[in-house]
Image (tube, helix red, strand yellow):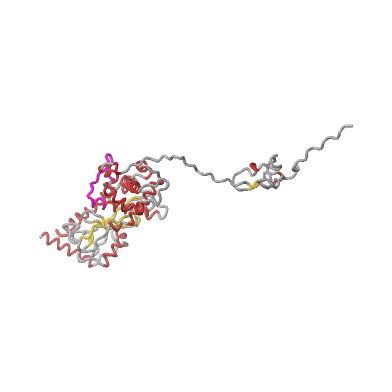
Amino acid sequence: MAAASAPPPRLPFSPGDPPTAPADCPAPGPCRTRCCCCGGCGSAERGGGGEAATSGGGPGGVPTPRRKRGRRRRFYPEHRVYRARCSFLDLSEEQVLRRYRLDKAAIAGLCRELGADLESLTGRSHALPVAVKVTSALTFLASGSFQTATRDSTGISQSAMSNCLAQFLEALQRRAARYIAFPPTTARAGTVAGAFPGVLGLVGGMHVALRAPSENEPAYRNAGNYHSMNMQVVCDAAGTITNVVAKFPGSCPNAAVLENSALARLLEGARPDGAWLLGDRSYPLKPWLMTPIAAPRGAAEERYNALHHQALAVLRRTLALLKLRFRCLDKGRGCLQYAPQKVCQIFLACCILHNIALRRRMPLELPEGLPPPEIEPDLPLPPPHGQTSSEARAVRARIVQQVKDGLG
């Protein structure tokens, strides 16, 4: 008699039922695959990895949870390699003037003055020194090159270059009152334009091109059909900038910029006797603002216009020198690729650095092969609105009489 055959080995699961892991399985729950490690499934196969989700890959359509994958850490090499940085102290005085438009003593003074704002709180992650931040910002302002091109000469990355420029502009803007101050007293009157009497300053506008803003784009398109900011500048006879208004878009006329500035409110309220500003035909005649005579009659009025034009030549030369010293303001080098607020900060910083250069009587040394700034045609000057007051006409008539007495 044949011996009875042995019964088949009992499986730990039923072929038709969804398998489940035993109680001691490190990953309990429904299984996708069966293996012999725990009688249910291999925990390494559960869910297939990826984001936390469910799938119907198990037998019987049972959803299977996916295990959340951990975030991979970024490992840096033990010895990191940094770009070589050139210190301005290693350059000659002539090279420093050509590259930064300031001498070594002026740059060192800026580093000491701005050090509290630019110095890193810690020395971690190979923090940039104050001198590198200052010279990086000066390189951009002086060369007019975009940050991507400027970073190659400074030895820092594009993001670091952007941070250096932003920190430098913020720090310098906080100290603007130390370098730019309008004199409201009569002690300075009459010392600005030589033969023209009682002049406190010369006022004019300068358009700085920028990329088309995303908001209110038509307001920034000026009469020259490009986007700009209309910057108001006041200077004295030496070319020192004494007042700056940098916040109005290019479509705003010069008269409106002056009318809505604190300078106009100051001169309207507490104007010194016998003192005034000089402006071109884009400004209205005020008791504190003398403009040219539209249709001069007689030798005295023609002489008045000649002295007025001679005095304003100082302002035109100052604005041209500003663009020549800081090529980022030159439209021929391309418009500034920044928001209007940052463009205003850049212009204010250039005016402060211009005054520092004048105080130290630093010559303007341009790099060889650098073309001169583009000579832009004068934008059309819209006639000022409003009627001229009788007081303003009387003040100008007295000046014409003084000129006439001088001719006699």
Q: Quadrant of the C terminus?
A: bottom left
Inspect the magenta stretch and tell me whether residue 320 lies in it: no
Q: Is residue 344 visible?
A: no
Residue 39 visible to the viewer:
yes
123 relative to 303, above or below: above
The residue range painted magenta reads 356-374
Q: Residue at x 27, y 39 (%)?
A: 369
Residue 90 coordinates in the image, percent (x, y): 29, 41
Q: Nearer the viewer, residue 407 or 357?
A: 357
- Residue situated furthest left in the rendering: 408
Q: Is residue 365 magenta?
A: yes
Please determine whether, in this image, residue 272 is positioned above or below residue 144.
below
Query: Where's the N terminus, which quadrant?
Result: top right
Q: Nearer the viewer, residue 41 or 214?
A: 41
The answer to which image quadrant residue 200 occupies is bottom left
Q: Where is residue 395 drawn, in percent x and y? A: 20, 65
Name the residue rendered at 42%, 46% in the picture: 125
Question: What secondary structure is the magenta-colored segment mainly?
Answer: loop
Counting from the top left corner in percent of width and height, residue 153 is at 34, 41
In the figure, is residue 273 to the left or right of 337?
left
